[in-house]
Image (tube, rainbow, N blue to C red):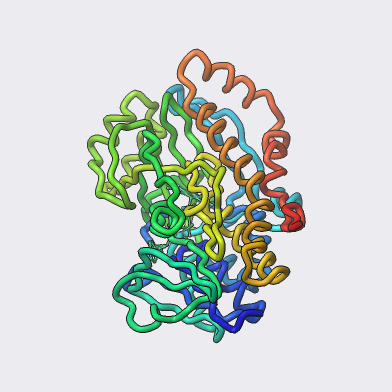
Amino acid sequence: MSTMPIAISGAGVAGMSTALHLAKKGHEVHLLEAAAELSEVGAGLQLSANALRCLEPLGLLPALKAVATAPLSIEMANGRAGSKLTRIPLGTHAEEKYGLPYLVIHRADLQNVLKEAIRAEPNITLHLGCRIQNAVQHEDGVSLEGGLCGRHLETRYACLIAADGVWSKIRKNALNLPSAEFSGRVAYRTTVPIEGVPEHMRNTTGLWMGNKSHLVHYPVHNGSMLNIVAIRREDWHEEHWAYTASTLELRKAFEDWQDEPRQILELSENWTRWALCGLRPDGPWHKGQIALIGDAAHAMLPFMAQGAAMGIEDAYILSSAIEKLGTTSEAFAAYEKARKPRVARVVRQAINNERIYHLPMPGCFARDMVLKTSSPESLLAKFDWIYGWKPEDDALN
Ligand SMILES: Cc1cc2nc3c(=O)[nH]c(=O)nc-3n(C[C@H](O)[C@H](O)[C@H](O)COP(=O)(O)OP(=O)(O)OC[C@H]3O[C@@H](n4cnc5c(N)ncnc54)[C@H](O)[C@@H]3O)c2cc1C
C-alpha cells in the first residue's frame, strides 16, 4: 500500500462515502471541499435499498433511519385529469423484498450523518474552503492545483478521486473531457412544515404526471417536513445550483392541472429552481492516477431518483478496487469497467421514465390504462434490478 495519502476533491455524498470506505480499509484520506462550510440546500433525496446496502457497512443505517422516513407507497396520478392511477407498495413490502428499506431523507440530514462519521474517523482529514482546479500526474503520485487551502496542496498524493460534482473542474482541466450540458429541463424545489399538509400525503410519495412536466412530493426530516419537486421542460439555464424561483410563474405553468396537485404548489411561497444538466456516462472515468466518481463521472437527470445512489455505489466499488489492486491505474480501470454498464442502464431507465411521466394526450391514456390495470407489485418488480442490486453484481475483474 502506498504511504502517500489519497486525495478526494468534493465532499458531496459521493466524496464523503468514498472517504469513509477508504478510511475503514486503512487509507489516509484528504477530503478537499471548495465550500467554506458543509451546508446543503433544503431539499429531499430518495435513498433506495441499493444505496443503503453500500452505506450499511459504514455503520450508518441506525443514524439514517433515525432522521429518514420509509414511505408506505408511491401514489401515481395524472395531474391534468386528477385521476389516481396506482399505489405501489413500499414500506415493509419494499424492506422485505430488498432486505433494506426505501427511505426518503432531507439532504442536510444525510450530509450530517456522513459528516459526523467523517469527524469520528482519524484516517480522514477534511479541508474546507479548498477549491481544486486541476491535478498533475507525476511518476511518484499526483499534485493538486487550487486555491485557499494552504500548504497541504504541496503534498503529493497517491491518487486523486474527483467527486466534485456535475461541474467538475478535474473532469474538464485534468482529463480534458466535455462539460455537462443543459437538458432543457428545470426543477423547482421547496420544503414545507408537515402541519399544513393534508393527512393522506404525510406518509407516502406522490408522483403526479402531466404534459412535459411532473410533480413529486414526500416527507423528510423525520416526517416533520414535506419535500416538493416540480420538473418541467423550460428554456432557462444558469450553471450551478439553486436560484430563487418566481412562485407566480411556477403556478402559471401548472394552471391547466387539477385542483389537488395545484394546491400542493400553493403550499409554499419559497421555491428554488435548478437547471438540470447531464453527462454522457460512456466515459472515460479515469486517466492514470485520477478517477471520476458520482456526478463528476455520470451526472444524470433525476427521473429515476438514482444520481446520489449511483455515487454511493461507485464509492463502494472504487474503494473495493483500491483494496484489491492498490492506488493504481489498474484499480481505476477495474472500477470503471465494473460500474459503467449499470450506470448506463440506469441513465437509460431515467430517460424512459421521463418519456412516460411527460406523455401528452393521447399517449397518456394508454399509460394511465396500463398503470390502472397492472398489479402494483409488478410495477415495483420492474425495478428489482436497481433496488435489489448487491455490490457483488458489479464484479471486479
Ligand atoms: C431535482 C433533483 C432531484 C434528485 N433526486 C435524487 C434522489 O431522489 N435520489 C438520488 O439518489 N439522487 C437524486 N438526485 C441526484 C443527486 O442530487 C446527485 O446525483 C448527487 O447529489 C451527486 O452527488 P456528488 O457527490 O457526485 O456531487 P455533489 O453533490 O454535487 O457534490 C460535489 C461536491 O464537490 C464540491 N466541489 C465542487 N467543485 C469543487 C472543487 N473545484 N474543489 C473542491 N470541491 C468542489 C461541491 O461543493 C460539493 O460539495 C437528484 C438531483 C436533482 C437535481
Q: Where is residue 260 in the image (x, y as percent from the top left)?
A: 41, 33
Quadrant location of ligand 1? bottom left
| Left or right: 35 as drawn, with respect to 341 | left
**Residue name at image x 66 percent, y 79 percent:** 1
Q: Position of residue 66 (x, y in %)?
A: 56, 68
Q: Which residue sits furthest bottom?
A: 122
**Residue name at image x 54 percent, y 50 percent:** 203
Q: Position of residue 220 (x, y in %)?
A: 47, 57
| Left or right: 386 as drawn, with respect to 307 | right
Q: Position of residue 87 (x, y in %)?
A: 61, 36
Residue 256 is drawn in which quadrant?
top left
Residue 348 vertical placement versus 293 (above, below): above
Residue 86 is drawn in which quadrant?
top right
**Residue name at image x 48 percent, y 67 percent:** 137
| Left or right: 375 as drawn, with respect to 40 | right
Asked if residue 271 shows in the view, the reply is yes
Q: Which residue sits furthest front?
A: 139
